[in-house]
Amino acid sequence: MHATLTSEISQNIVNRTMKILPYNVNVMDNEGKIIGSGDPKRISMKHEVAVEVIRKKQSIEVKSEDALPWGGVKEGLNLPIVIGDEIVGVVGITGKLDEIRGYGELVKMTAEMIIEQSILEKELQLDERINREVITQLINKGYKYDTLFYKKIKILQLNLNEPRVAIVIKGNTDELRLLSRLTDMLKELIEEHDLYTTLFTGEMVILKKVSLNDGIWNEEKTLQVLKIWLTKLDRLGLEISISIGSFYSEHKEWWKSYEEAKDALVVGEKLKVTQRIFQFRDVSLYVLLSKMIPTIKENSIFRGYDKLKLNDKNLELQNTLDSYIKNSGNSKQTAAELYVHRNTVQYRLSKIHEITGKNPFFYSDLFELYLSLIVDKLD
């Protein structure tokens, strides 16, 4: 990256050096104009000695008796600021030469270090921006991979042949402070080759490098890592959800893994699934149903469930149906879970039949009721 000496960087050099040295410091750009100084009145003035330093590419000392020909420049030492092989400016120390001569190289080195640090920070910011753009493009269904995309890949030195799956991590809070802490902790947890970015929604997306066994994704190993992450993230005191998509070998299909992870998170939270790591393969049917909600709700199957909701304001019948389905149609287990008598369960199921016209004791009717129950949760 090309080194540019700005007014902000120059004044930073001045402020930091003058905290240590009891002498005025000036910083001039590559045209000899003062752009940083301990004396604000000198800002924007032309520094004739600096022009000569740049021309000769060497330091110049100005003695008090020689100052007048230099247009009023004061006694002092002026040194070129060199980044790489380029002179980007000049740093000057005002004072008696016998007193300041020993500080010259130190101030010059400090100035060059501050500039190099600024360049590095800009490079890191650029890399981070490009990294964010690349990941956003990789998870974008409609993105057309062009020459510019592959140039960015080259800049970041990314290997698109590494096997990856998409992971979405969400902290259920609106507090920016906590979300920031979540992001910082995740940056410490993710491994070297993982790609990550934070979306405007506050969710973090990770294209995680995974292990393969004979070309097949080792899901268990990835899940173990996520469980470790979750244990550490719990220290933040946040309600955190993690979802994970399927494995696709081609980078042009990674968007599918992201879409699956995103859908799995939404569906898992709506269904109030007990686990906190949602895998798409576990909720794929429910994701499909969620996309069919408009069609299903127009069907007579769901209208029967609407009647149930109208006649079940305290959710007693719906909760009983939910438990009955989760317990595979076992009335005894349902009664135990709900802390009621088995006859109560039988009565409630009969009531559901009466209201909806669907008999929970018949598997075909129970399936329709289950479908309606799930759609209602997902809606």
Image: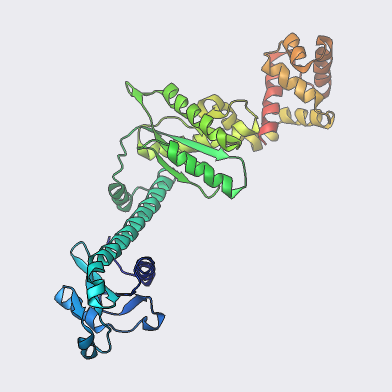
Q: Residue at x 72, y 16 (%)?
A: 324
Which residue occupies the foreground of this view, 291 or 98?
98
Asked where in the image residue 104 lies, by quadrant, the reply is bottom left
Q: Where residue 271 sits in the image (x, y, percent)? A: 65, 30
Q: Residue at x 34, y 69 (%)?
A: 21
Q: Is residue 294 left or right of residue 315?
A: left
Q: Is residue 261 left or right of residue 27?
A: right
Q: Is residue 379 left or right of residue 346?
A: left
Check the picture and name the quadrant holding the C terminus: top right
Asked where in the image residue 251 lies, by quadrant, the reply is top left
Q: Where residue 262 sits in the image (x, y, percent)? A: 53, 37
Which residue occupies the foreground of this view, 170 or 188?
188
Residue 95 seen in the figure = yes
Outermost residue, left side: 56
Residue 90 seen in the figure = no
Q: Residue at x 37, y 72 (%)?
A: 7
Q: Where residue 32 sits in the image (x, y, percent)? A: 26, 79
Q: Is residue 223 left or right of residue 194?
A: right
Asked where in the image residue 3 lies, by quadrant, the reply is bottom left
Check the picture and name the quadrant holding the N terminus: bottom left
Q: Where residue 298 sits in the image (x, y, percent)? A: 70, 35
Q: How many marks?
A: 0
Colour mapping: rainbow
Q: Is residue 373 above or below residue 36?
A: above
